[in-house]
Amino acid sequence: MVNGLDYAWSTSMIDPHFTLIKVWLDVSEEQAGPLLVRCRFEEPWQIIGPLQSASPTIQVRRFQPDPRVEAVTPGLIRQIVEAARLAGWQPEIDREGRHFEWVSGDLHPVDDATLPGEDPFGVLKTN
């Protein structure tokens, strides 16, 4: 619940570096325009092979903490909903979904949040 309204949300993997967060009013996914947010997330088991075969420079960079990577939690969903509302998302009347990327605590509009973002380490090639 955010500001008196119930929201539902789901996540799905876009690629090994990004996850897609889908948020909608809990009344019905059909009635409201969903919020689609691309968010950095590392699935370590997806990159272990390419990481082991990468150059030492890339391996060192890869194991440095990255402040852009956040776990998807109910608290993060609240932050995203509040930021999207401030950015003009109105799921009660919007029939079209809105697309954003969540980066270091900020929401940025994007054309298509379902597409992979830039590979931050240059380790993996995605189709």
Image (cartoon, grey):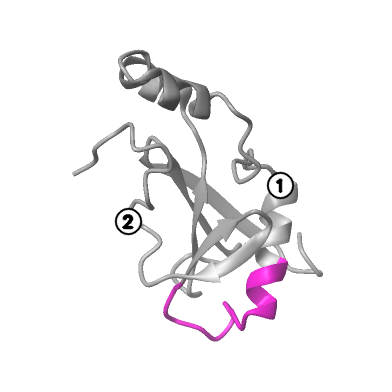
Q: Distance between the residues labelled 2 and 1?
A: 23 Å
Residue 90 drawn at (x, y percent): 60, 81
Q: In which quarter of the image is residue 123?
A: top left
Span colored in magenta: 82-98
Q: In which quarter of the image is residue 112?
A: bottom left
User: In the image, is residue 98 above or below residue 122?
Assistant: below
Locate the N terminus and report the quarter of the image it occupies.
Answer: bottom right
Q: Residue at x 57, y 58 (%)?
A: 102
Residue 2 drawn at (x, y percent): 77, 64
Is residue 26 magenta-colored? no
Say what secondary structure mark 2 lies in: loop
Is residue 85 magenta-colored? yes
Q: Which of marks 2 and 1 is nearer the N terminus?
A: 1
Q: Residue at x 68, y 69 (%)?
A: 83
Residue 75 drawn at (x, y percent): 75, 49
> Is residue 20 toward the left or the right of residue 93 in the image?
left
92 or 45: nearer the viewer: 45
Residue position marked by numbered label 2 in the rendering:
115
Mark 1 residue type: Pro
Name the chief secondary structure element in magenta: loop
Q: Which residue is drawn at 61% across and 83% down?
A: 88
Q: Which residue is drawn at 65% across and 53% down?
A: 104
> Is residue 102 toward the left or the right of residue 19 in the image?
right
Front tag of 2 and 1: 2
> Is residue 119 toward the left or the right of residue 86 in the image?
left
Say what secondary structure mark 1 lies in: helix
> How many C-alpha atoms fall within 10 Å of the one at disc 2: few (<14), some, or many (≥20)?
some
Mark 2 residue type: Leu
Residue position marked by numbered label 1 in the rendering:
74
Locate the C terminus and report the quarter of the image it occupies.
Answer: top left
> How many C-alpha atoms fall within 10 Å of the one at disc 1: few (<14), some, or many (≥20)?
few
